[in-house]
Image (cartoon, rainbow, N blue to C red):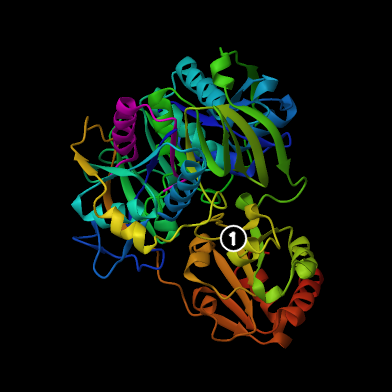
Amino acid sequence: MKILVCITHVPDTTSKIAFTDNNTKFDKNGVQFIIGPYDDYALARAVELKEASGGTLTVLNVGTAETEPTIRKALAIGADDAIRVNAEPTDSFFVAQQIAAIAKENNYDLILMGRESIDFNGGMVHGMVGELLGIPSFSPVMKLDIEGNTAKMAREIEGGKEYLEVSLPFVAGCQEPIAEWKIPNMRGIMSARTKPLNVVEPSGTTENTKVSEFQLPPAKGAVKMFTVDQVADLVKALKNEAKVI
Amino acid sequence: MSVLVFIEAADGVVKKSSLEAVSYGFKLAGASVTAIAMGSISSDELAKVGAAGAAKVLHIADSRLDNGVIQAYASALTQAVDKTGADTLVLATSSLGNAVAARVAVSMQAALVSNVVDLPETGSGFKVKRSIYTGKAFAMTEVTTAKKILAIKKNAVEIKEDGAAASVEALVVNLTDADFAAKITSVDKAEGDVLLPEADIVVSGGRGLKGPENWGMIEDLAKSLGAATGCSKPVSDMDWRPHHEHVGQTGVKVSPSLYIAVGISGAIQHLAGVNSSKYIVVVNKDPEAPFFKAADYGIAGDAFEVLPKLTEAIKAAK
């Protein structure tokens, strides 16, 4: 089985979000970048599937040279090789086109990624790739098993989940608890250094959206504290001040 | 602007977030809009969408669409956009909506903007505000295509309630076997509860509740408020509660009017799931819990003491 896992290179979930250059650029100062947490779940499941049934596992990232440490980490976790499309991933459709172009050349049986990136939260690249390739797409997938040419999966729906069966190939946007995150071991880290990381230039340049300005939400006021005996006062405040009950 | 709004139903009832999308479409079009629904929903229920601003509801009454088969929905929606000549598709950001909209964006060559929180600015070009960094920031996003799809974040739009009943028309589309390549074998869904992502009030419990056997207190408080229940990640990881109730960075992101967190310390990953709430109430026995910094109201007290009192006080205030 040939598996492709697409990963994002995103600020750590504890990062302070700030912008520079007149609110047109993300402030990377002091920010640590990681594999997107949802992508990390997809990668972990892909490593398990490869271990169980053999095959190859390629990771793909659309990003500039600064994402390479993140890509190496994915190699350390268990991918065999990597492709970096040398471009700034500023628009979902642009990214989807890059993934679809690579996928068309390589005929993957399975294309996994996170349900969404945690920077722009678009949650649309998997669906776009599926439509561009003319194959099914699913998200958010929380369980994935493969027997022969058939996949069985669970997709989260609002208030529960649905169970699906489909033939390969397809695209899935993944989330927990599809697998446990994997921490690279020393052998993985050593071998990752010499695994192939191919850099390719982007194909096609269609961008449908452009961010003109970033904004931060207004600062929150101080918390109003109540004692255990003032519960009725809290309820009054919710009713008359906040007007939410 | 010619606007089509995709509406979703759950258990035969149009979702609140879809009514929000219809009202958004109404404001966008400056007049009545057309909505589209799929699967088995009664005409009476669909006509009610009129109140939110739709003059007409197109209905693809194909029972194969009762479950959300993503490809079939995308194919049906693309055909509906073609038939109506709509240039703008509006829908609610949701588990199904996003998955479908992404495919439709490619097939109708439209830009897709998700988590939209406000009406667009159309002075020069078309700019729309969306929530990013899991609610920690916003991006004014310029759309450069003629056709657009806007997925509206939940609870970002006030629902219009004074429109007349909508006319309901059947729409026939051509769906192939390939559209149903994925087979939904079963659906496992809580019945009758308030859907967490849609809820106007959410009551969440954390490890401070000490065990799943104490969830009755959370449920009682939620019941007194007509609220949905949620939980923190450790609670879902320990299987005290199902994953679809996990609120946070890697779980459900909620944006209710009121979020009540009980026995949750407020790790940054949890805050990422709730920071779009209008008001936050935190109950925690540790007065130093970081969650208080993100709260509007707080009680430093034991959950087991506070919860029953709070439930009683709310019942008394109603």
Quickly name the residue at label 1.
B257
Quadrant (top left/top right/bottom left/bottom right) for the N terminus of chain B: top left
Asked if the stretch drawn in magenta spans residue A184, the answer is no
User: Image height check: is B33 above or below A172?
Assistant: above
Q: Quadrant of residue B16?
A: top right
Q: Position of residue B173 (x, y in %)?
A: 57, 14
Amino acid bearing label 1: Ser
Residue B254 visible to the viewer = yes
Q: Nearer the viewer, residue A191 or B159?
A: A191
Q: Position of residue B186 (x, y in %)?
A: 71, 34
Asked if the stretch drawn in magenta spans residue A105, the answer is yes
**Count of labels shown?**
1
Bounds of the magenta segment: A90-116
Q: Position of residue A77 (x, y in %)?
A: 39, 54
The 10 Å Cα crowd at callout 1, few under 14, some 14 to 19, many 20 or more, is some
From the viewer's perspective, is B138 left or right of B214? left
Quadrant (top left/top right/bottom left/bottom right) for the C terminus of chain B: bottom right
The chain carrying label 1 is: B
Q: Secondary structure at mark 1?
A: loop
Residue B160 visible to the viewer = no
User: Image height check: is A70 above or below A86?
Assistant: below
The residue lying at 54 percent from left, 55 percent from top is B253
The residue lying at 54 percent from left, 78 percent from top is B292
From the viewer's perspective, is B65 left or right of B308? left
The residue lying at 61 percent from left, 75 percent from top is B282
Q: Position of residue A101 (x, y in %)?
A: 29, 29
From the viewer's perspective, is B231 left or right of B121? right
Q: Nearer the viewer, residue A212 or A112?
A: A112
